[in-house]
Image: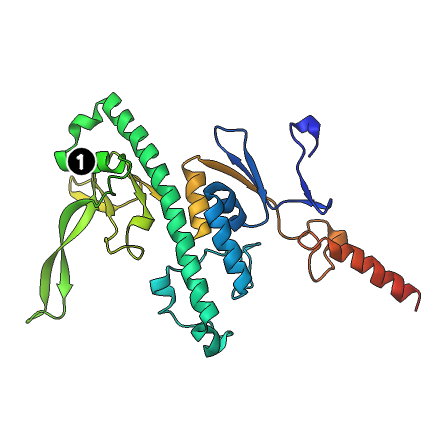
């Protein structure tokens, strides 16, 4: 953790390093943070930061994303969140309050900002994937509809891919008599990876999500299909944690995570761990001194 290892880590209160140590691949930029929210404030910019500050000011949500707790944006989009059962410990007054509704709106806006950031990444990623497909000749094996989807996904401001219509049979209890009926759904079956930004689809927009499928042949020569993510690149904006995991998966970021609990047994007796609350160490000394000198 010193200069001889290449860099000196900044410390919180001259006591501990930040929990998240993030590098933006291909640059010399690094982000040090204790919350996933703060990482995205740096990446996405001022508007994200302003929404986070406004959400903090409301004081509706008290948890952070330290350890396994959710981040500020880790909540369903507003349409779903407002229809969900209210938390048992909040009481009906909180769910009905103006602050609660403002918080839902701000969380939804944070999701839209993640979506917009992911759009630029989708275009650049898809363009690179398409170029590789042209270079190795696999582009020529695609149908016209598949090529159109891949070009659309790589076009800035051109919309977003909606998949190739496919038909499946589903059981319809409402039919008279009940029977299997055909249903059309959007699919992606090509081996060329399609970059998907989840913010373009339900529940964020009315567009149905694309089902990614592949076909294979079993040992008896029977062809079958199976759902898979091997032919898609997913930019998942639904929560802050999932979005950062997506950025790591596409090698946009690397992230080292340090423990949220104190690994030193000498300090594990504290109820509130001093790796998160370094001032407790000082307070504990004062309490010990008071006990020794009643």
Task: State the residue at coordinates (66%, 53%).
Answer: 276
What quarter of the picture does the C terminus occupy? bottom right
The image's colour scheme reads rainbow
Q: Where is residue 66 drawn, in percent x and y?
A: 57, 54
In the image, taking residue 195 as reference, residue 85 lies left or right, namely: right
154 and 101: which is toward the camera:
101
The answer to whether any part of residue 238 appears in the image is no
Task: State the residue at coordinates (30%, 43%).
Answer: 196
Mark 1: secondary structure: helix
1 and 123: which is toward the camera:
123
Q: Is residue 148 above or below residue 179?
A: above
Q: Is residue 294 above or below residue 246?
A: below
The answer to whether any part of residue 122 appears in the image is yes
Task: State the residue at coordinates (13%, 34%).
Answer: 144
Q: Quadrant of residue 3?
A: top right
Task: State the residue at coordinates (53%, 40%).
Answer: 255
In the image, taking residue 270 as reference, residue 116 lies left or right, namely: left
């Amino acid at each position: 953790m010193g200069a001889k290892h290449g860099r000196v880590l900044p410390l919180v209160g001259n006591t501990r390093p930040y929990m998240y140590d993030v590098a933006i691949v291909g640059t010399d930029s690094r982000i040090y943070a204790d919350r996933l929210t703060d990482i995205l404030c740096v990446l996405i910019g001022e508007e994200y930061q302003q929404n986070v500050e406004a959400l903090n000011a409301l004081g509706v949500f008290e948890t952070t994303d330290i350890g396994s707790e959710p981040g500020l944006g880790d909540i369903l989009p507003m349409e779903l969140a407002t229809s969900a059962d209210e938390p048992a410990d909040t009481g009906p007054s909180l769910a009905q309050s103006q602050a609660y509704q403002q918080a839902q709106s701000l969380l939804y806006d944070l999701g839209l900002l993640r979506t917009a950031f992911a759009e630029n990444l989708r275009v650049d990623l898809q363009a690179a994937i398409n170029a590789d497909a042209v270079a190795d000749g696999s582009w020529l094996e695609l149908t016209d509809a598949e090529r159109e989807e891949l070009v659309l996904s790589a076009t800035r401001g051109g919309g977003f891919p909606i998949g190739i219509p496919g038909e499946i049979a589903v059981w319809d209890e409402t039919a008279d008599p009940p029977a299997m009926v055909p249903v059309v759904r959007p699919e992606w079956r090509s081996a060329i990876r399609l970059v998907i930004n989840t913010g373009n689809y339900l529940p964020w927009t009315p567009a149905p999500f694309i089902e990614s499928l592949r076909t294979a042949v079993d040992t008896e020569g029977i062809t079958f299909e199976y759902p898979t993510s091997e032919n898609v690149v997913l930019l998942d904006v639904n929560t802050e944690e999932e979005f950062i995991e997506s950025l790591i998966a596409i090698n946009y970021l690397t992230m080292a995570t340090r423990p949220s609990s104190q690994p030193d047994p000498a300090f594990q007796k504290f109820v509130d761990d001093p790796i998160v609350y370094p001032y407790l160490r000082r307070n504990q000394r004062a309490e010990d001194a008071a006990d020794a000198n009643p």
